[in-house]
Image (spheres, grey):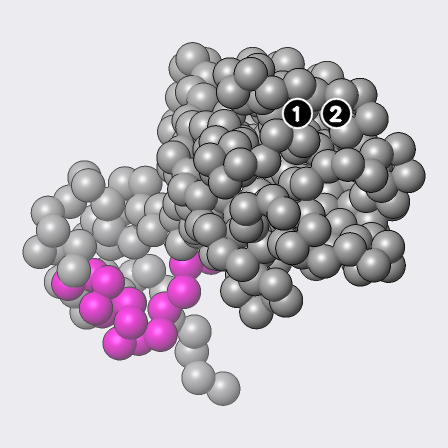
């Protein structure tokens, strides 16, 4: 059986000391050696097929170079580009992402947090946080650096979110500019910062355009899913038959509204215009193609990775809250009211 190459073999081939080779192959200490030496060591490791023993390093440093990434719904097409951004951002620093899916179940989230912490995960990136969630450290055990994506909580945690307020104001401005006055809102869950911020922004935007928000024109979706959006849209249509436009809490809620409108014999956009939020992939292939607020999905992921790496290096630094710009992409689901 072929001998497994060691760090000493790499150092011998690169003509450096073993400690130098070790520093060059560790992203956290690579800047301690010259770029020329680091490249020579990396090339030697590649030639020999050497792979660092991450398990042994974990025992020595009590770190794993692994970040836990927990999302609420893998079926939501918005999340794969975000996860890709996270993976790319972590990979540059020698970290890998361990992915978990909760299906919106808070108990499942606690189980995943506990399981990942048991593997000495160096930090977490969470897309599942609720507004009143405690710090992850309160789940027990040692504190772990944590960054929130597409969410905020009352806890003092770094976060990366799209500009929800600007996005909703832009959609209301678009609809008002088309001549809509009776605009309804299918709001997302209010225990989540995303749903709450977009609902508050809708009220403010309507007021800014001197438009009235009748209680019958707001329905709250139990989740950011197509099924929950459909149920909320049915409730909305039962309570109000005069709205000419709907601002949905996200794209999946908007697609649920499509089905409810179709079942009532209403056409989009001839009878009711519909606007989503997130601009998830393939919206241009819907019928009609959905107008939506485009968020920088990949950049949310890379920015979250950057914040987490900063947090790992300095856990006591002030929590940064990054808000990324958005754009409204107008498609066929919005038109002037009849």
The answer for how far apart the CA atoms under marks 1 and 2 are is 8 Å
Whether residue 289 appears in this view of the structure is: yes
In the depicted structure, whether residue 20 falls above or below residue 185: below
Query: Residue 221 versus residue 247: which sits nearer the camera?
Result: 247
Query: Residue 235 versus residue 60: which sits nearer the camera?
Result: 235
Which numbered marker is on residue 190?
Answer: 2
Circle 1 sits on which residue?
199
Residue located at (28% from left, 67% from top): 45
Circles 1, 2 touching at the beta carbon (< 8 Å): yes
Tell me which corner region of the image, top left, top right, bottom left or bottom right, holds residue 280: bottom right
Residue 43 sits inside the magenta stretch:
yes
In the depicted structure, whether residue 309 falls above or below residue 34: above
Tell me which corner region of the image, top left, top right, bottom left or bottom right, holds residue 10: bottom left
Q: Position of residue 8 (x, y in %)?
A: 29, 61
Q: Main secondary structure of the magenta part?
A: helix
Q: Position of residue 149 (x, y in %)?
A: 55, 35
Write down the region rendered in magenta: 40-57
Residue located at (38% from left, 35% from top): 325
Camera-nearest label, 1 or 2: 1
In the depicted structure, whether residue 324 falls above or below residue 57: above
């Amino acid at each position: 059986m072929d001998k497994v190459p060691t760090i000493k073999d790499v150092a011998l081939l690169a003509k450096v000391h073993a400690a130098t080779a070790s520093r060059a192959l560790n992203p956290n200490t690579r800047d301690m050696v010259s770029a020329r030496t680091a490249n020579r060591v990396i090339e030697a490791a590649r030639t020999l097929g050497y792979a660092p023993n991450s398990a042994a390093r974990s025992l020595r440093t009590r770190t794993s170079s692994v970040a836990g990434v927990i999302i609420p719904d893998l079926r939501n097409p918005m999340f794969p580009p975000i996860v890709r951004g996270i993976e790319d951002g972590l990979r540059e620093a020698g970290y890998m992402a361990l992915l978990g899916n909760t299906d919106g179940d808070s108990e499942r989230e606690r189980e995943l947090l506990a399981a990942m912490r048991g593997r000495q995960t160096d930090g977490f990136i969470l897309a599942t946080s609720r507004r009143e969630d405690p710090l992850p450290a309160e789940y027990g055990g040692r504190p772990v650096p944590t960054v929130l994506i597409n969410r905020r909580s009352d806890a003092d945690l770094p976060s990366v979110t799209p500009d929800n307020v600007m996005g909703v104001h832009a959609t209301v401005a678009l609809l008002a500019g088309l001549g809509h006055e009776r605009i309804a809102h299918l709001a997302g869950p209010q225990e989540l910062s995303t749903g709450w911020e977009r609902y508050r922004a809708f009220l403010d935007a309507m007021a800014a355009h001197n438009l009235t928000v009748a209680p019958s024109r707001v329905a709250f979706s139990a989740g950011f899913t197509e099924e929950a959006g459909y149920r909320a849209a049915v409730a909305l249509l039962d309570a109000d038959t005069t709205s000419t436009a709907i601002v949905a809490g996200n794209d999946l809620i908007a697609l649920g509204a499509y089905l409810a409108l179709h079942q009532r014999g209403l056409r989009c956009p001839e009878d009711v215009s519909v606007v989503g939020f997130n601009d998830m992939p393939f919206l241009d292939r819907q019928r009609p193609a959905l107008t939506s607020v485009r968020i920088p999905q990949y950049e949310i992921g890379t920015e979250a990775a950057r914040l987490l790496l900063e947090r790992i290096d300095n856990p006591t630094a002030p929590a940064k809250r990054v808000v990324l710009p958005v754009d409204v992409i107008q498609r066929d689901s919005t038109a002037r009211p009849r």
